[in-house]
């Protein structure tokens, strides 16, 4: 294992709940639509515009808004979201992650971020992790979002490591598909059944250790 390529939302910090709160607020205010709690999973790992499209589809509203209106709605959601994440501090790093990053680094493993979020650099800054990662792949520069492999491949490339020497880390179904499509070993946190495409699934980030990553990589890499 020469690099670990991390998703951010739901892996390094629990921003998934802020995304969902912001979307729920927007859906209620703009469409008088209540998003069921189960909808949170559908929005993990997919881009801002794709998330909005999924919500519009759910409300049977897909054809009712112009491209420009969709853009404005997406911007509005982002304003709500940015307000929430402005309050993040290093206390919001998920359990086990700081030690994992330190141990990976100590073992010479490069660290990259492969998030679909355009807010990733801001979040890393807030968490005090901006200088811990060797590279942050820019989602604006890749052709296709998750489940396509592009953002994970960009993360590997940014740290100069071949994809088959990387472990990808995810909490989303679309993200695990992206890791596997990139020919990386996939370690995931969350529901075992939902994320069964991953090479290893653990219930919480507390279970993430350098040893686990190393063992899973040795067992499954191509
Ligand atoms: C992550 C989250 C998604 C979010 C996407 C875009 O992948 O899991 O829920 O839609 O980033 O985030 P952004 O901050 O650019 O709206
Ligand atoms: Mg995620």
Image: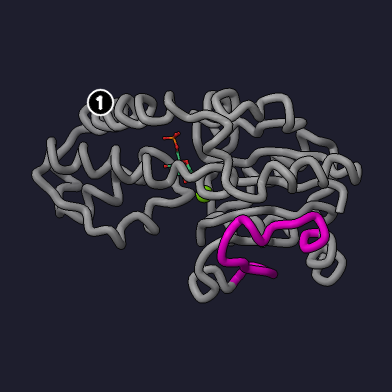
For this orientation, the residue located farthest to the front is 91
Q: Is residue 59 left or right of residue 149?
A: left
Q: Is residue 161 left or right of residue 130?
A: right
For this orientation, the residue located farthest to the bottom is 193
Q: Residue at x 80, y 55 (%)?
A: 210
Q: Report x, y in % for residue 217.
A: 82, 63
Question: In which quarter of the view is residue 90 placed?
Answer: top right
Question: Which of 151/25 is in front?
Answer: 25
Ligand 1 resides in the quarter of the picture at: top left
32 to 120, vertically: above or below: below
Question: In which quarter of the view is residue 138 placed?
Answer: top right
Highlighted magenta segment, given as a residue range:
197-213
Question: Which of 67/58 is in front?
Answer: 58
The C terminus: image quadrant: bottom right
Query: Which residue is under mark 1?
Result: 72
> For the residue carrying disc 1, how many other residues have a C-alpha within 10 Å: few (<14), some (14-19), or many (20+)?
few
Q: Residue at x 83, y 65 (%)?
A: 221
Q: Secondary structure at mark 1?
A: helix
192 to 184, vertically: above or below: below
Q: Residue at x 43, y 24 (%)?
A: 86
The N terminus: image quadrant: bottom right
Q: Report x, y in % for residue 125.
A: 59, 23
For this orientation, the residue located farthest to the left is 32
Residue 210 counted in the magenta span: yes
Residue 24 counted in the magenta span: no
Q: How is the image coloured?
A: one colour
Question: Which of 15/7 is in front?
Answer: 15
Q: Report x, y in % for residue 55.
A: 25, 49
167 to 68, vertically: above or below: below
Q: Report x, y in % for residue 131.
A: 72, 25
């Amino acid at each position: 294992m020469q690099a670990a390529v991390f998703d951010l939302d739901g892996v390094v910090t629990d921003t998934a709940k802020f995304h969902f709160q912001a979307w729920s607020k927007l859906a209620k205010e703009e469409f008088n639509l209540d998003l069921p709690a189960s909808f949170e999973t559908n929005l993990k790992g997919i881009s801002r515009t794709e998330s909005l499209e999924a919500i519009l589809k759910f409300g049977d509203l897909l054809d009712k808004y112009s491209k420009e209106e969709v853009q404005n709605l997406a911007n509005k959601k982002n304003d709500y979201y940015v307000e929430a994440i402005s309050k993040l501090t290093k206390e919001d790093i998920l359990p086990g992650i700081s030690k994992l990053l330190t141990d990976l680094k100590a073992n010479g493993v490069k660290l990259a971020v492969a998030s679909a979020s355009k807010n990733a650099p801001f979040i890393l800054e807030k968490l005090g992790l901006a200088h811990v990662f060797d590279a942050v792949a820019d989602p604006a520069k890749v052709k296709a979002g998750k489940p396509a492999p592009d953002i994970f491949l960009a993360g590997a490339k940014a740290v100069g490591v071949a994809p088959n020497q990387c472990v990808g880390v995810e909490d989303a179904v679309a993200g695990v598909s992206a890791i596997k499509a990139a020919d990386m070993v996939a370690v995931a946190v969350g529901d075992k059944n939902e994320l069964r495409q991953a090479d290893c699934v653990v219930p919480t980030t507390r279970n993430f250790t350098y040893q686990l990553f190393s063992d899973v990589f040795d067992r499954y890499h191509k």
